[in-house]
Image (tube, rainbow, N blue to C red):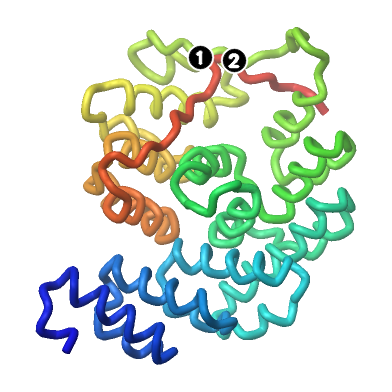
Amino acid sequence: MCNVLPAFGRNNCLTGVAIKTQNISVCSKIGSSSPAYSGCVTGLLRTTMNMSYCENLQFPFSSECIYNFSERAGFSNLSMCSELLNSTYATACTDLYYFEKADSTGNSAYCTHLERNASPISLYTIELNESETNVSGPQYSGQILENSALNFTPYAYCNYRLAVDFKQRTLCQNLNSNLSRTICNSTFLAPNTIPVNTLTIDFNATNVTAACTDTQYKGLCAFVYEINKATSVSGGNESACLQLNESEGKDACLYSLAITYKNPAYCNDVQSANIAAVCFNQTTVYPSNFIIPNFTFTTTVPVGYT
């Protein structure tokens, strides 16, 4: 009977049948590429506690699903993670469990259970834990840029949050790059303290070489300079992002451009499949009036602290 309805009514009808019959296969009749499919599965999940359904969703909705289930269980049931046959999602679930333990107690011992390799899906799931509203756009639009520049692993991010939130400066040494340790330590500076060494970026310069005279942190400087150049032009300037290499944050620059101007075309050149998925979802799934907060770097970044 649902099939005789127009597309929008048909999808809502199928979602209602799926929920009524507790049958996820009905959602597949919508088509997994449709945003309505995620809505159908999510609606079904509200009435069941089967975490394995999360694997039917594409990233980033799969991570939101894992977060929702973990939250409903009070982040106290690690065994739920074993329902996920996809090892990447199972790891993200486990990382979220231990991060919540660390974040709620201030005990860095829990951080040791988190991945020490780059894991965007785990980081995304963890960051949802810090969001007051379970919506991927507002928080992650800034976080994905920060994590790209600081190259956080789940383990490092866990230590960073505890260092900042619980005033445990020694944990800054557990971060995975000199730059991230520097940023972590800089949060402990007294108010109005001016660091001895600073990275200053000349945004009026015509090229990176002129804008970034501090060669020690040229990678970060190039990232900040080019992303400013890319987003300051009306409609966006993709060529500025393409001047960056992968290690300097080309994907994050393109992502920022795409969500700033709500243009999914900028997502096409994103190399990371995980970032590309978030990019396309946030520029096509969310309505045109969806507000994503501005995310900008300050022109001076403290460096040189140990």
256 lies left or right of 75: left
240 lies left or right of 250: left
What percent of the width, then of the height, locates residue 302? 68, 19
Residue shown at 61% from the left, 39% from the top: 150
| Image vertical order of residue 91 relative to residue 164, above or below | below
> Which element carries disc 1, helix, strand or loop?
loop
Marks 1 and 2 close (CB-CB < 8 Å): yes
Q: Which mark is residue 300?
A: 2
**Lower sequence index among marks 1 and 2:** 1
Residue shown at 52% from the left, 68% from the top: 65
What percent of the width, then of the height, locates residue 193? 77, 9
| Image vertical order of residue 120 relative to residue 213, above or below | below
State the quadrant of the C terminus: top right
Q: Mark 2: which amino acid?
A: Thr
Q: Which mark is residue 283?
A: none
Q: Nearer the viewer, mark 1 or mark 2?
A: 2
Q: Mark 1: which amino acid?
A: Ile
State the residue in front, 227 or 66.
66
Residue 196, quarter of picture? top right
Residue shown at 67% from the left, 33% from the top: 179
Q: Which mark is residue 201?
A: 1
**Disc 1/disc 2 C-alpha distance (Å):** 7 Å
